[in-house]
Image (cartoon, grey):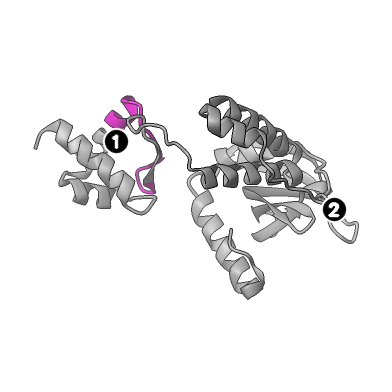
Amino acid sequence: MSRTHRLFQLMQALRSLPSPATAAHLADATGVSARTLYRDIDTLRGLGAVIDGEAGYGYTLIEDAHLPPLGFKDAELEALVLGLREVAAVGDPALADAARTALTKLRARLPKRQAHRLRHSVLVAHRFNPPTKPNIDSGVLREACWEEKIVGFDYTDKNGTPTRREVKPLSIMLFDQSHCLLAWCLTREDFRAFRLDRMATLVVTDRSFRPERAPLMKTYLANLKAAAGDRLVPF
């Protein structure tokens, strides 16, 4: 098998296998050794493919430089517009600004007919009771989630009791009227949800918990689903 054909097979496996695909599954799909598989992953990254993951955890194809950009059907475009306007209405300040900017960029890059459709869309999203504003920079916190860096902050619970927490941040989620950080609390050694409007003095440390975020988040969501039952809307 030529090297080019092997790399093509690896790309196909990354697109088709459930993510993250383990090195063992990828090596089996392409018929190579683990050592060759790791070299091929590095080669694809060098050619422009954005592949997340590492040995011992698994790999996910984030961006394929060889696939052409997709066009949108009218219904898909309207779904995007409504989704972005919903984020602008209920997202934390950083995400709300990003949604408005994304909508402007989307309109500028669409074909003329669809740009006109977007500009005059009747779809709106309005909340009469918007979420409370966070006391910390949600953009910095979101980046810490992605970078899998442990963070510390002061927290005041519903009874007004102050504590200092260190956590592994997993995700920011909107619950009812509050944005909450879903995290593994190192102080309590358990999963916890922290309201962003009760957090203060956020500090991002240089201590990494990579690659724990994905499995921790999967477990936390499973726990939430089990506790809430039918009351939890899938997300």
Residue positioned 20% across, 50% down in the render: 29
Q: Quadrant of the N terminus?
A: top left
- Is 204 left, or right, of 215 in this rendering? right
Amino acid type, residue under disc 1 in the picture: Ile
Q: Earlier in the sequence, mark 1 or mark 2?
A: 1
- Give residue 42's quadrant in the image: top left
Residue 233, compared with residue 211, is above or below; it is: below
Q: Is residue 149 magenta?
A: no
Q: Quadrant of the C terminus?
A: bottom right
Q: Nearer the viewer, residue 91 or 195?
A: 91
Q: Which mark is on residue 233?
A: none
Task: Give coordinates of residue 204: x percent, y percent.
Answer: 67, 36
Disc number lying in front (1 or 2): 2
- Is 172 left, or right, of 12 in this rendering? right
Mark 1 Cα shell of 10 Å, populated few (<14), some (14-19), many (≥20): many
Residue 121 is at least partly visible in this image: yes
Residue 185 is at least partly visible in this image: no
Q: Which portion, as a residue range, is magenta? A: 42-58
* Residue, disc 1: 41
Q: CA distance from mark 1 to mark 2?
A: 48 Å
Residue positioned 42% across, 36% down in the render: 70
Task: Give coordinates of residue 206: x percent, y percent.
Answer: 60, 34
* Residue, disc 2: 129
Mark 2 Cα shell of 10 Å, populated few (<14), some (14-19), many (≥20): few
Amino acid type, residue under disc 2 in the picture: Asn
- Is 198 left, or right, of 73 in this rendering? right
Q: Nearer the viewer, residue 29 or 57?
A: 29
* Secondary structure beneath label 2: loop
Residue positioned 72% across, 45% down in the render: 124
* Secondary structure beneath label 1: helix
